[in-house]
Image (cartoon, rainbow, N blue to C red):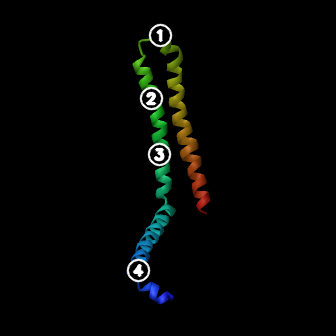
Amino acid sequence: MNKEELDQRDWIAAEREHLMKFAEKEDEGRERRKGGDTWQQHLALLTLVVSGGLVATMAACTALREHLFVWTVFSPKFLFAGAWGTFFHWGVTLGWGSLLWVAGKL
């Protein structure tokens, strides 16, 4: 059999069409990932992780608020976590990370 006879078979044509659809979808995905949308999703995920840690610390302080140990250990931890979450996340993650992202695009 030669190449022309093989190309005329139905299952080969169907498979070729199927693979071309996947190739088009992959090209669309690459175009989408090139935009700023990826960075925004990354920042949203980082913000979610930082806020999750802060919420867990707040829940622990709230649940144990009547225990004396909370005021000596968890209260400073809560204040430190809040300050770290605010300054590190906004300054380093969002600020410095955004500068590096833009510099990488140049």
SS for callout 3: helix
Q: Residue 8 carries which label?
A: none
* Residue annotated with mark 1: 68
Please, which residue is most extreme toward the top here?
Answer: 68
Q: Do the residues labelled 2 and 1 touch (CB within 8 Å)?
A: no
Residue at x 50% of width, y 19% of height: 74
Circle 4 — which element? Answer: helix
| Residue assigned mark 3 | 45
Q: Nearer the viewer, mark 2 or mark 1?
A: 2
- Tell me the crowding category of disc 2: few under 14, some 14 to 19, or many 20 or more residues within 10 angstroms, Cα based: few
Quadrant for the C terminus, please: bottom right
Please, what is the three-letter code of the amino acid marked with disc 2? Ala
Mark 4 and mark 2: Cα distance apart in space: 56 Å
Could you tell me residue 24's position as x and y percent? 44, 71
Between the residue at mark 3 and the residue at mark 4, the CA separation in whole angstroms equals 42 Å
Query: Which residue is label 4 attached to?
Result: 13
* Marks 4 and 1, the one that precedes in the sequence: 4
Dot 3 or dot 1: first in sequence order is: 3
Q: Which residue is drawn at 49% across and 48% down?
A: 43
Q: Mark 2 points at which residue?
A: 56
Q: How crowded is mark 3: few (under 14 residues within 10 Å), some or many (20 or more)?
A: few
Q: With 93 as the anchor, is 65 left or right in this view?
A: left
Label 1: few (<14), some or many (≥20) within 10 Å? Answer: few
Image quadrant assignment for residue 56:
top left
